[in-house]
Image (cartoon, rainbow, N blue to C red):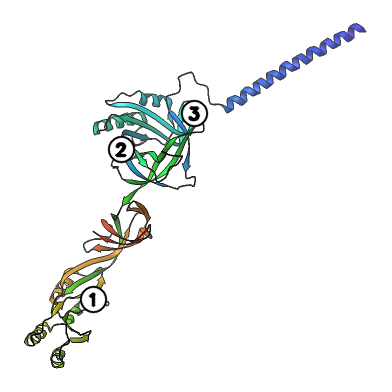
Amino acid sequence: MAKKKKKLRVKKKKNFSRFMIYLMMAVMLLSGFYFIGRSPPKREEGSLPSMETYDVRQIPEESNVTVKVITKEIMTELVAKINFPINFETIRNIQNTSLDGLEKTTLEVGNPKFYESAIEGKAYLLFRFTFDEIDDNRTTSVKNILDAELGTNNYNLLGGCIGNLPINISGPGTDRVYFPCEFDTEVDDYFMIFLLKKTRDGLFEGMIGFVRNKIKVGPVIDADVVNITNILAQGFIESDFYPDRLSKINTSDIEIVPPKILINKTVGNETLEEINSLPAVDTLIEDNKTLISFNSSYEDISEILKMENISYNLEEGYLTFTVPESTNVSSMNYTLNESGISNITLKKAGFVSLPDKVIIDDKLVTIPNNERFNAMLNVETEIGDRINVSLSTLRYGEQVFIMGAEET
C-alpha cells in the first residue's frame, strides 16, 4: 500500500508541473498579443526617415481663435504643406534631393500618427527647403520634385516667415513665431493666425502659426461694391442762378442755400427798400451787419450798392440733392450748368464689403457691419467693382472706431 501512495504523489506533482508550464505559456502568449496591439511595428535601426515631430496644441485653447502677428523676417525657405499621410520611401526620395543652393530639407510633423510605412500629421506636416537664397528657378525645381513625388496640386507651396506676436506666450523672448506665408508677403504685413505651441517630452520647443487671413492696413483698403442706392449731387452757386430750371431733375430732397452779400454795417432803409423790391431777394440786419440773399438779382443789387458807395463781400451758396441711381448723369449736369450751378460733384451712395478687421495706427480695429458698410462711391463705379476706400475714424482714448468709407 505504501508503494501505491508514493506513485500517486509523483503523478500529482507531474500534473501540477505541467499545469504551471501551460499557465506560463498562456500568460506569455497573451502578453505578446497585448503588446503587439499596443505598440507600433518595430523597425530596424535607421529605417525611419529623419524628421522633427512635436506635440502641439492651439493657443489660446478656444476653438478657431486667431492671434494678430506682424511679419518681421522673410526666410530663404520654401515650405510644402501636405494634408495626407506620406510614405517613408517618398520622404527619403524628397530628402535625398540635391539642388543648387539647398542647405537642408526638414520634415516637420505636428501631432504625428505612424502607420506601418507612412506618417500623417494630425495637426500639420511640412517639408521645409532651406536655401542660401530663393529665386524663380529654385522654386520651379522644388515644384518639379514635389509634383513627381506627390502629384500636382497635392500640396501647397509657400514661403517661410517670422512674425512678432503682441505678447510673450511662454516667458521672455517667446513673442516670435514661425509661420508659412504666401510668396507676396512683405515685412510689416499683418495676419491673423492660428497659433500652435510645440512641445517634445513636455518641454517647450517654440511655436508655429498658420494664416487664417491677411489684415489690411488702413486707412486706405480694398473693398467690393455690393449695392448702389442713389446719386448724391453737390454744386456751388457763385452768383446769379435760376432755381426754377431745376424742376427738370427728378428729386424730392433738394437743399438750396442761396449766395449772400455781406455788408459790415447797417444799410439805410431807403436802400433796403430798393433792394427788397427786386425778385427773390431776402435781407436781414443782425449785429450791425446786413445780409442780402438772392437768386438772379446780383447785377441789380451790386449796381445799387455801387451807387451808394457801399462795399461788400460775396459769399457762395450751394446746392445738394439725391437722385435715383438710374438717372442720366449727362442730362442732369446740363440742367445744373444751365441753372447757374458750378463746380458740380457727383457721388454714388451704396454699400461695400470690407474685411472684418483692419489695422489703424498699429491697432487691430473691428469694422461693424463689414459685409454691408455704407460708402460714398465715384459716379463711374458699378456693383461688383473692386475699389479702394478711405476709412474715416473716431478716436476715444485708446479705442478707434470706423465711422465711414469713401472711394479714393
Which quadrant, please, contains the N terminus? top right
Label 2 or label 1, whichever comes before in sequence order: 2
Which residue is disc 2 drawn over? 74
Of residues 28 and 282, the one drawn nearer to the viewer in this rendering? 282
Crowd band around label 2 with a 10 angstrom C-alpha radius: few (<14), some (14–19), many (20+): some
Q: Does residue 370 lie above or below 287 as drawn?
A: above
Under mark 3, the amino acid is Tyr
Which quadrant is the C terminus positioned in? bottom left
| Pointer 3 local density, CA inside 10 Å: few below 14, some 14–19, many at least 20 | some
The image shows residue 39, relative to residue 62, as above or below, that is: above
What's the distance in space between the residues labelled 2 and 1, CA to CA? 57 Å
Which residue is depicted at the point 75% across and 14% down?
18
- The label nearer to you, 3 versus 2, is 2
Residue 107 in the image: state x and y as whole percent: 40, 29
Q: Residue 127: x percent and y percent?
A: 37, 31
Q: Secondary structure beneath disc 2?
A: strand
Q: Nearer the viewer, residue 165 or 353?
A: 165
* Element type where label 1 sits in the image: loop
Q: Is residue 333 above or below residue 199?
A: below
Q: Residues within 10 Å of mark 1 (few under 14, many from 20)?
A: some
Residue at the disc numbered 1 = 250
Give the labeled residue for mark 3: 115
Q: Quadrant of residue 194?
A: top left
Q: CA distance from mark 1 to mark 3?
A: 74 Å
Most distant residue in the top direction = 3
Report the residue at 13% width, 80% height from top: 312
